[in-house]
Each structure stands twice: as C-alpha cells, then as structure tokens.
Image (cartoon, rainbow, N blue to C red):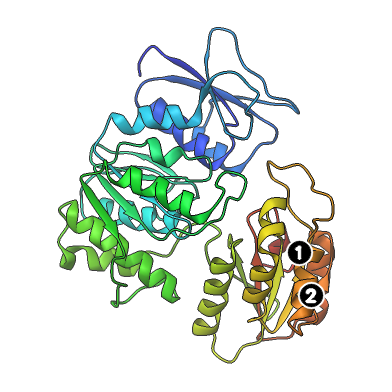
Amino acid sequence: MRGRRLWFVGIGGAGLSAYAQLARARGAEVGGWDRVRTPYLDALGDVEVEISPEPVTREGWEAVVSSAYPDVPGLRRAEFLRELVSGASSIVVAGTHGKGTTAALIAYTLRETGRDPAWLIGAPVLQLGSNAGFGEGYLVVEGDESDRTVFGLPAEIAVVTNVELDHHTEFASAAELEAAFERWLSQVRHVVRDAPAYRGPLALPGEHNRRNAGAALAALELAGVPRAEAEGPLAAFTGTGRRFEVHEGDGRTIVDDYAHHPAEIAATIAAARERWPGATVRVLFQPHLFSRTRHLAWQLAEALAAADDVTVTDVYPAREQPVAGVTGKLVVDALSDRGVLAGWTPTVEEGARRLQRRARDGDVLLVLGAGDVDRAVGMLGG
C-alpha cells in the first residue's frame, strides 16, 4: 500500500481503527475523522485525526467510509476489508455470536505458538495489545454479517460460530441469512462449523465459551497447529474487551458484557451463575437498535428473566432513527407479562443508581448491552 493516502471516515470505531493500523503497517499514509475521540485511536499514535460533529473528507486522500455513514462518498469499508484480506492467507471468523472471542482465541494461540499472525478484531484484546496486529503469518479476521461485509471476504479457512437472525433491517428472514452464509461457504476451501465444544481447561466461563474454544481449536488444527500445542494458549486466554469483563468494587462483582441479543444475554447470565454459584445476579440492560427491540422484545425478556433482578434503560439507537412506540419499556412490559417486576430507568445514570440502591455485598451486577451502557461500570464503583 505504499504511496496511498487513506482517510478513514469513522476511524475511531473498532473496525476502521484496526483497518487503519494494518494499512499503515503495509506502507500507506493514514488519517481520518470521527465525532469523538475513542480508546481505539490510542494504537494509531500520532496519526492525524479530525474530531468534529459532521463527517470530513480530505482532498487528495482516498476516503474509506464506515457503514455508519452511507451518504459519505468513498470506498466502503466492506470493499477495503476485502482488499486487505485478499493480500494474505486468511482465517475469517463469522457468526451471530462469539465471533470476536473466537477470532481472538485463534490469533492469540497462533502468536503464542510462534506463527506470527496478523489480525483484525472488532474489540480490544488485552493479551494481544491491540485489536489489530501485523505479522507475516495468517491474517485472522472477525467478519461482520450485519451489512453483509463477511460475504465478500476470500477466506482460506472460514469459521462459523452460529447463525441466528440479529439484523432485522438487513435480512428479511433467518432463511435469507442462512442462504447468504451457504453461498459464501460454498466458495471457501476449509470450513469449520458445528465444531464440538472444547472440554479442556479455560479461563473463560460458560458453555458458549467452550463452543467458541472448540471452533477455534478446529480452525487452528486446519492452520497447522497440533491440538496439544494449542491447548496451553487456549487455557491462558482471558477474553476480549466487554466480553465478560470482570471488575470488583464496593463488595460487589461487576461484569461488563456486550451481550445484546437474547441468546447472548442468556449465555452471559448462565456463565455468571456458573462462576458465582449462589450469588444474587442483578442486571442493568440497555436495548440496542429500535428494530431489534421491536422484533425481539419478548425473547429479550425471556432471557433477562433468568436474573434475580432486572433494570432496563431506553434503546441505544446507534445507526437507526427512532420508531414510534418502540422504547426499552417494551422489554419491561414483556418481563411483566412473564411475572417479572423490572425497573424502567430510561437513562443509564438512573439505571446505575437503581442498581446501587438495591445491591448487597456478594451480589453480581451484570452491565449488558452494545451501546454506551458500559459507562455504568464506573458509576457502580468498578
């Protein structure tokens, strides 16, 4: 990429920040714009970043644009990622749940066994030092189906953790989503799907993480890592940012987790029960996206009902515009229909205060959601 000047619109996001790091490592000059300064920008060091309310492009620079800004002209992030992946032997990890953790497990194990991987992962990974890495071995990529990006990636090894409808504005049905995966996988030489759960020692709790580790192990074996060599790093891996991230504060345990889909919420609550048997589990949940809340309110309530105490905030809109009649109260009402009296606190601040009032020493407080609900961790003393 030497000689190219790449301006990333949305450079502070988990995805584009990683792409910018890899592009710079491959010789490009990079810069970009975002609305706010995020922790992902730290890894870019002194790269020029413009912070302003509205998207900015630069004359003489090639724009690479996040899918969050469809009206900004330039190379779409899916096209640019395809270009990055095309230049290396790649392991692409896809699926509705667990793809970030599985990709990080693979990259970490490849690195720890001396295989010098590169990686692009949509979450911070403390043990890897960054969500992007630049080795000469396999390129490990977390692929995203939310805007169909993953279906354009030329993988040597494809890993599918699971397939469940989660993006209701992009796919009309689960059958359409499944068909898109099948078309993509038909073009891949090696496919890992429905791998058996890993039963060896893991630092990560929960059956969902045993399945993630099983998928990672199968991919690693295809990449030439013997099982016996992989087991040590798998056991030592402690997770990615906001995936069962444990904080201790004021006599309570606080777990910050990105879970926003019913299956993820159920898995996280089950993992907390497994790790702290007998503890009271209290949840602060922020619904993510109006479309998901409208379609899955009942299923969200069903998953949340497994906790001992539930507090729900209003919807984090992300890229969507408000929908009349769709608020977080839909989830509260669905919980009520199941006989669960949940707290309705429209703001994260109110939710944190409610949890703080109700919590007792020894409780486990789960902060769940894909928006900005993670702010509550500091408010709760974590």
Residue 127, image x, y percentages:
40, 55
Where residue 193 sits, quadrant-wise, is bottom left
Q: Is residue 352 left or right of residue 171?
A: right
Q: Residue at x 59, y 18 (%)?
A: 73
Query: Compared to 25, does 93 lie above or below?
Result: below
Query: Compared to 204, does 376 lie above or below?
Result: above
- Say which element carries label 2: helix
* Mark 1–mark 2 distance (CA, rounded to whole Å): 9 Å
Q: Is residue 199 left or right of residue 259?
A: left
Between disc 1 and disc 2, whose residue precedes?
2
Tell which residue pokes out farthest to the top in this image: 60
Pointer 1: what residue? 379
Query: Compared to 48, does 13 lie above or below?
Result: below
Question: Could you tell me which quadrant the N terminus lies in?
Answer: top left
Q: Nearer the viewer, residue 341 or 248?
A: 341
Q: Residues within 10 Å of mark 2 (few under 14, many from 20)?
A: some
- Say which element carries label 1: helix
Residue 167, image x, y percentages:
58, 50
Pointer 2: what residue? 356
Residue 342, image x, y percentages:
79, 77
Q: Residue at x 18, y 54 (%)?
A: 222
Which amino acid lies under the numbered mark 2 shown in the image of this protein?
Answer: Gln
Does the residue at mark 1 contact the one at mark 2 (Cβ under 8 Å)? yes
Which amino acid lies under the numbered mark 1 shown in the image of this protein?
Answer: Met
Q: Residue at x 23, y 40 (%)?
A: 137
In this view of the protein, can residue 245 be seen by the observer?
Answer: no
Q: Nearer the viewer, residue 203 or 321?
A: 321
Q: How many marks?
A: 2
Q: Residues within 10 Å of mark 1 (few under 14, many from 20)?
A: some
Question: Could you tell me which quadrant the C terminus lies in?
Answer: bottom right
